Image: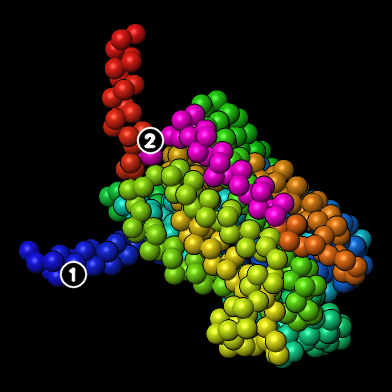
């Protein structure tokens, strides 16, 4: 066979990998659409806007806003950990609907009220509950509605579509804050109610609006009892006793049985030895994960203070990252199906952690690039910056590009690893408990975010933001260094993946065991 024919055959096989999802049930595609909409709502109405909203609308300083975000994030993570077993017991559809309703109500309250005593408990913290309900059920749904042959591509597409929702949300975030929208500190009067909303409250309201279509889609079209098996789609009918018209199952009985089943599933996890390895692995990942929390909680204020009000920080950090991920993740998912998740996380997290040091360098190092074609393309052609392009745009651009390449390698495989290691029927529990190490990480980032901004990048006074990012970069290096050092203790064999040790090392170990 000629080299041209061989290349053609490889290309055909490469693109054929993407067609494996044709046999997946419609529920998988409903998950994808709902996920895009929820991530759009989260990115435009939560994520980056919360610290700005807390300071501008509620009058909190950097440290106070950081502490509030730390509490919010920690509540969200803790509840995510606890509701995983509830999802396994309650079912995907019902958990979905509860989560959407809670998010809709809480986001609406945050948009329409400016009273701290109302929006904090009933808005901000209640939204954490709603998001926490949706996180494990989304990932568990992808596993349930795909089989082993489809899983790598299914999770790669899942992660790519998450970034599609984020990209649209970041674009809207910049547009509404920009000169063509409301401005950084503008306002808009809500028709009929006559309530005047600030720019940040309008962003939160947009998030509430985009919660509605996902909720309707799940309510009308997601079926119960659907599962994708190796033999095809299987639908398990609802038992007669579970019919809507059966009055023998009271609300109290249903709640009590669900709670008992939840407790049984949750307690059983801690008796599984592999679960502790899993938690150790997820704990290491916290280091590199903290970069993304800082992008949500630290970067918006940093970008606005260093680049000016209305600066396109959403497109620069978010859209760029998400478009790269959208393109690279499916390709990486197809090309690395045989490579272990552990190896992918180690290599990818190293690339991501090193990327932070681009913005830990003095911006003047990038001045020549800012004055050349690169600065003209990034600043003028893409971002629409007027006048001289700050070299900081170049360093941030390089940081985000390198971060995204690393993320495309490691992050989607982390989801797949979590799903693959979970026993049958405990997918959501594992998905939820995989967030347990992030509980303290979010507390740490939320708390240190405000302090770092106040210390190194305050609203007024001398600044040294490069030191702030150097500290963040050093913390991120914990992941690749730790993963390499402890690989023999926490790496597990994954089905269909490369061996956890190479054949030569296995032969040496076998010889040592024989001698003993």
Please state the horizontal and vertical placement of residue 87, each as a whole percent of the image: 58, 47
Q: Is residue 117 above or below residue 207?
A: above
Toward the top, the furthest residue is 516
List the residue tagged with mark 2: 500
Which secondary structure type mostly characterizes the magenta part of the structure? helix
List the residue tagged with mark 1: 8
In the structure shown, which secondary structural element does the residue marked by tag 2 occupy?
loop
Residue, x 28% and y 67% (percent of image)? 15
Please state the horizontal and vertical placement of residue 444, each as a whole percent of the image: 75, 47
How many numbered marks does the figure carry? 2
Magenta range: 470-495
Please rate how many residues cluster around mark 1, counting C-alpha atoms within 10 Å: few if below 14, some from 14 to 19, many from 20: few
Q: Is residue 242 above or below residue 365?
A: above
Which mark is on residue 453? Answer: none
Query: Is residue 405 left or right of 60 when viewed as pictured?
Result: left
Q: Is residue 476 magenta?
A: yes
């Amino acid at each position: 066979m000629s080299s041209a024919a061989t290349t053609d055959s490889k290309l055909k096989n490469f693109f054929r990998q993407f067609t494996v999802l044709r046999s997946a049930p419609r529920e998988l595609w409903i998950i994808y659409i709902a996920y895009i909409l929820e991530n759009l709502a989260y990115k435009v109405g939560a994520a980056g806007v919360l610290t700005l909203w807390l300071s501008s609308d509620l009058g909190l300083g950097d440290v106070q806003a950081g502490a509030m975000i730390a509490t919010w994030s920690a509540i969200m993570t803790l509840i995510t950990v606890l509701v995983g077993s509830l999802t396994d017991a309650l079912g995907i559809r019902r958990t979905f609907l509860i989560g959407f309703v809670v998010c809709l109500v809480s986001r609406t309250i945050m948009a329409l009220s400016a009273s701290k005593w109302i929006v904090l408990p009933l808005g901000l913290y209640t939204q954490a509950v709603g998001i926490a309900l949706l996180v494990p059920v989304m990932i568990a749904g992808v596993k349930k509605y795909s089989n082993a042959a489809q899983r790598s591509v299914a999770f790669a597409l899942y992660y790519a579509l998450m970034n599609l929702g984020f990209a649209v949300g970041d674009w809207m975030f910049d547009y509404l804050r920009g000169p063509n929208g409301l401005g950084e500190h503008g306002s808009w009067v809500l028709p009929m109610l006559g309530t005047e909303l600030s720019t940040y409250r309008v962003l939160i309201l947009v998030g509430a609006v985009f919660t509605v279509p996902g909720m309707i889609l799940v309510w009308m079209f997601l079926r119960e009892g659907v599962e994708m098996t190796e033999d095809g789609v299987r639908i398990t009918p609802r038992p007669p006793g579970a019919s809507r018209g059966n009055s023998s199952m009271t609300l109290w009985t249903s709640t009590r049985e669900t709670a008992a089943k939840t407790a049984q599933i949750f307690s059983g996890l801690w008796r599984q030895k592999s679960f502790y390895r899993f938690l150790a692995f997820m704990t290491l990942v916290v280091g590199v994960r903290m970069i993304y929390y800082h992008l949500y909680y630290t970067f918006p204020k940093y970008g606005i203070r260093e680049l000016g009000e209305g600066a396109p920080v959403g497109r620069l950090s978010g859209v760029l990252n998400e478009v790269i991920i959208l393109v690279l993740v499916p390709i990486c998912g197809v090309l690395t199906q045989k490579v272990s998740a552990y190896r992918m996380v180690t290599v990818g997290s190293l690339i991501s952690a090193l990327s932070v040091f681009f913005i830990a360098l003095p911006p003047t190092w990038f001045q020549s690039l800012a004055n050349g074609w690169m600065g003209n393309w990034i600043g003028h052609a893409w971002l629409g910056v007027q006048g001289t392009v700050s070299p900081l745009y170049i360093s941030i651009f390089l940081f985000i590009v390198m971060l995204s390449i690393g993320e495309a390698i490691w992050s989607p495989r982390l989801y797949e690893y979590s799903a693959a290691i979970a026993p049958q029927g405990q997918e959501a529990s594992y998905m939820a408990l995989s967030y347990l190490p992030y509980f303290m990480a979010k507390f740490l980032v939320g708390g240190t975010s405000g302090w770092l901004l106040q210390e190194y990048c305050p609203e007024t006074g001398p600044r040294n933001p490069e030191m702030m990012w150097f500290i963040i970069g050093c913390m991120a290096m914990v992941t690749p260094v730790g993963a390499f050092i402890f690989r023999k203790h926490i790496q597990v064999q994954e089905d269909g993946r490369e061996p956890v040790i190479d054949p030569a090392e296995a032969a040496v170990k076998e010889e040592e065991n024989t001698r003993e």
